[in-house]
Each structure stands twice: as C-alpha cells, then as structure tokens.
Image (tube, rainbow, N blue to C red):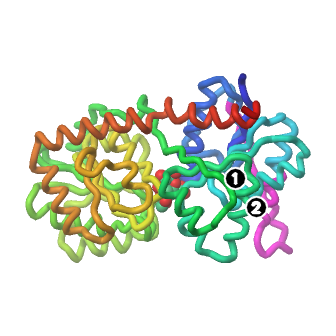
C-alpha cells in the first residue's frame, strides 16, 4: 500500500531536519508520496524527486503582531495540505511546536490523518525544563497517535521530565550507506596542508554550549603533544569564537582547521582517524554514525544516547563529561596502535551496518504507519 505522508521539521541545518529529510527521501524511493510542510526548503532536499512535494509555510508579518504567528500558519498549512492531498500520515519531527500544530491541523482539516511525532533531543532535554512549555510538550506527546524517540535514553528522559501518559518507541537515527562510506579523498589532506603522517581528529557540530567544543580542543591539545596531528572543526555556531580564543591561548591555532559548515561530509570523515563528540547533552549523536560508517572510531561522553551508539572498547571509547585528560589518553591509545585502530574502524563500520543502516530503520517507521492505518 502506497501512502501519502506529510513531514514537518526544522528545515535548517541540524540533526532533526537531516533525519526527517533523509527519511522522506527514502520513503519516496519506496514509492510513497511525500509532502514536506515547513518554513523553507529542507536543506538536504537538493534535487527534484517526482513524488516529493514541498509546501512552504508563509507567516503573516502584520504590524499588530508582536510575534509573527508561525505556529498558526504552520497548523493552517498542515490542515490545507492534509485535506487537499488526503494525507494518511502527518509525521512531525521535534515536539514543539510541531506536534501541537499537527493536532490542531487535524481538527481544522476534519480528517482522520494519523499523527506520528518523533522526539529528537533538545525538544525534551532543553525545552522540557522550561515550565512555560512542559504542558504543551506533554499535550503534543499524549495526543499524537504514535510517539518515537531517537534513543532509549531520550525515552527515559521524556518520562522523567514530562511524565506523559503515552508509550514511546525507540527508533534510532540512521545513515544512508550509499553516501556514508569510505571514499578516496586523500587529496584533501594535501589541500588542507595536512602532512601524510599526521593523524586527523574531527569534530562536527553546531557549536552550541551543549557540544562542549572547548573540551574537544583541550583533548586535542594533549594529543598533539605526543602524536603529530591536526584537528578539523566542522560546523559553526555561538561557541566558535570561544573555541578559537582557547586554541590561541594554548598555542595550537595552526594545528586546527576551522572549516565551517560543509557538505559532502563523507569526504572529510574518509581522511579522519578519530571523531570526538564530548557533549553535555546528546540524545543520539547523528555525526557519530556518519563517521563510523566511514570507518572512523569515536570517543564520546557517557551521556544521553551516546552509549547506545559507541560500544566502549569496541567501536570507540566513552569518557566522563569534562574529563578531557581521559579522552586524550583513549585517543592516544587508538592513534598509536595501528592494529587496534583497524579493529575499531572495522567494528564501527559493521555496527552501523547492523543497527543504524537506513534500509533497516525506514522499515521500522513504515511498520508504524501501516499499523496505525490498519489497526493491526
Ligand atoms: O545536535 C544538535 O544540537 C541538533 C539537534 C536537532 O534538534 O536537530 O540534534 C538532535 O537530534 C539529532 C537527530 O535525531 C540527534 O542525533 C542529536 O543527538 C540531537 N541533539 C541533542 O540531543 C543535543
């Protein structure tokens, strides 16, 4: 049975938008009709697909509004598309405001469109602490037909913080192995001025406070004392200036490549020997599986969903939050033992194939849709 599925997400750079868009593309490949409903074109939707449609939410800027009513505009657009296109499913990514908008949209449309909400992380672990939002988040979760979260840790945190009376199913992040695989991009090392024998450590994020990028720089500071290496920082965000200042103070500015936002990350992972993700909060860590799929072992903090992704001592290592000395020791262990590195690299690639490959995860979402529609 081919379905008509509406997808709403934050379309700008970010893990939740990336997962939502990739899911839409995969579902379209499987023959479903996909309708993205968002404020701008999702950033990963680069080319045209015959069965993917995009509906832009236009927000009224009337001067009387102190705050433009985005939520209402989104709900109205969802209702319009759900009714006109006879959507079977509205799958919204990120609880706030998307789940609440979907519920309102269903009432407006007067149809029986089913609502699936996927929790991605900060919608619970950051916004869940804001008393002005908790009731809305709880309402959005409880009134959705099915709720999923991207890790077991996020399911637990949602129950602790929001206490919804609703079953929440874990469906992990995924990557497309056709894209994320080791490619021959050795020329990049030369282009970036990285010597042949230098190890490359990579960090990819939105440089927000929760990512603790300063800990990544501190870890690298310890590593480069013993192993010739370079640190590649990919992405941008509010912490970038703090990070650059720290690199200056530590005297390692010339060993750090600040690449900013980049496309074709698989090329950068393919020249990397190690990925560092030392976040304070992380519901899953999509960049971990992107790197692992390209054979890059990872060191991450023992927080949120990271331990569900990195198998300590097998595909990488886990350390305590803020313990950059321990992270550096683990990094040195991996970077100075070629045999061990090879084993971890292969184990990382296999783990992604077994647990986080797109072809597996898309079926889990599809099963939810079919179960909802058939009642079985
Ligand atoms: O990493 C971010 O801060 C962006 C954030 C988002 O909302 O787009 O990512 C969240 O969702 C991703 C996809 O499910 C997860 O892989 C990230 O771990 C999660 N981020 C946090 O929990 C901080």
Residue at image location 78% in from the left, 75% down from the top: 66
Tag 2 secondary structure = helix
**Residue at 10 percent of width and 64 percent of height:** 225
Q: Nearer the viewer, residue 114 or 40?
A: 114
Q: Could you say where residue 176 lies in the image, as x and y percent from the top left?
A: 46, 34
Residue drawn at x 81%, y 49% is 77
Question: Is residue 142 shown in magenta?
Answer: no
Q: Earlier in the sequence, mark 2 or mark 1?
A: 1
Q: Is residue 243 left or right of residue 236?
A: left
Placement of 301 over or under 90, stated as above or below: below
Instruction: Name the element at disc 1.
Output: loop
Specify the segment rendered in magenta.
Answer: 52-76
Contact flag, marks 2 and 1 (Cβ < 8 Å):
yes
Side of 141 relative to 194 (left or right): right
- Does the Cβ of the disc 1 residue fall within 8 Å of ligand 1? no
Q: Residues within 10 Å of mark 1 (few under 14, many from 20)?
A: many
Q: Residue at x 64, y 66 (%)?
A: 163
- Looking at the rendered image, the quarter that the C terminus falls into is top right
Please say whether residue 60 is one of the residues in the magenta stretch: yes
Quadrant position of residue 90 = top right
- Residues under labels 2 and 1: Cα distance? 9 Å
Residue 39 is tagged as 1
Give the class, few, some or many, for how many residues have Cα within 10 Å of label 2's Cα (few <14, many ≥20): some
> From what the image shows, is residue 322 above or below residue 173?
below
Q: Nearer the viewer, residue 212 or 194?
A: 212
Residue 15 visible at all:
no
Q: Is residue 342 above or below residue 72?
A: above
Q: Position of residue 116 (x, y in %)?
A: 69, 46
Q: Is mark 2 within 8 Å of ligand 1?
A: no
Q: Is residue 28 left or right of residue 99?
A: left
Say the numbered circle drawn on residue 70.
2
Q: Can I make out residue 176 in this image? A: yes
């Amino acid at each position: 049975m081919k379905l008509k599925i509406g997808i709403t997400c934050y379309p700008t750079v970010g893990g939740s938008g990336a997962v939502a868009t990739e899911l839409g593309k995969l579902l379209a490949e499987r023959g479903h009709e996909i309708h993205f409903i968002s404020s701008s074109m999702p950033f990963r939707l680069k080319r045209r697909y015959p069965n993917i449609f995009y509906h832009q939410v236009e927000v009224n800027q009337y001067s009387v509004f102190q705050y433009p009513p985005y939520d209402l505009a989104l709900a109205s657009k969802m209702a319009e598309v759900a009714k006109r296109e006879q959507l079977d499913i509205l799958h919204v990514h990120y609880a706030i405001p998307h789940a609440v908008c979907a519920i309102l949209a269903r009432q407006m449309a007067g149809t029986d469109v089913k609502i699936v909400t996927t929790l991605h992380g900060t919608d619970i672990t950051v916004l869940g602490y804001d008393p002005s939002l908790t009731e809305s988040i709880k309402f959005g979760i409880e009134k959705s037909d099915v709720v999923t979260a991207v890790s077991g840790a996020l399911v637990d945190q949602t129950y602790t913080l929001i206490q919804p009376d609703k079953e929440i199913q874990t469906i992990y992040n995924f990557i497309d192995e056709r894209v994320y695989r080791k490619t021959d991009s050795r020329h990049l090392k030369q282009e970036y001025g990285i010597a042949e024998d230098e190890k490359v450590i990579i960090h990819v994020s939105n440089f927000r406070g929760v990512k603790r990028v300063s800990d990544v720089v501190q870890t690298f500071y310890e590593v480069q004392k013993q192993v010739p290496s370079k640190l590649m920082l990919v992405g941008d965000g509010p912490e970038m200036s703090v990070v650059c200042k720290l690199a200056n103070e530590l005297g390692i500015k010339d060993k750090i490549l600040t690449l900013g936002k980049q496309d074709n990350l698989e090329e950068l992972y393919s020249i990397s020997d190690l990925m560092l993700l030392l976040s304070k909060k992380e519901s899953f860590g999509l960049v971990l599986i992107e790197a692992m799929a390209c054979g890059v072992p990872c060191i991450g903090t023992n927080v949120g969903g990271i331990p569900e992704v990195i198998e300590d001592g097998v595909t990488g290592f886990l350390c305590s939050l803020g313990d950059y000395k321990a992270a550096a020791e683990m990094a040195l262990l991996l970077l100075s033992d070629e045999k061990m590195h090879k084993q971890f690299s292969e184990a990382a690639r296999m783990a992604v194939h077994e647990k986080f490959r797109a072809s597996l995860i898309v079926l889990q979402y599809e099963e939810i849709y079919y179960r909802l529609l058939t009642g079985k």
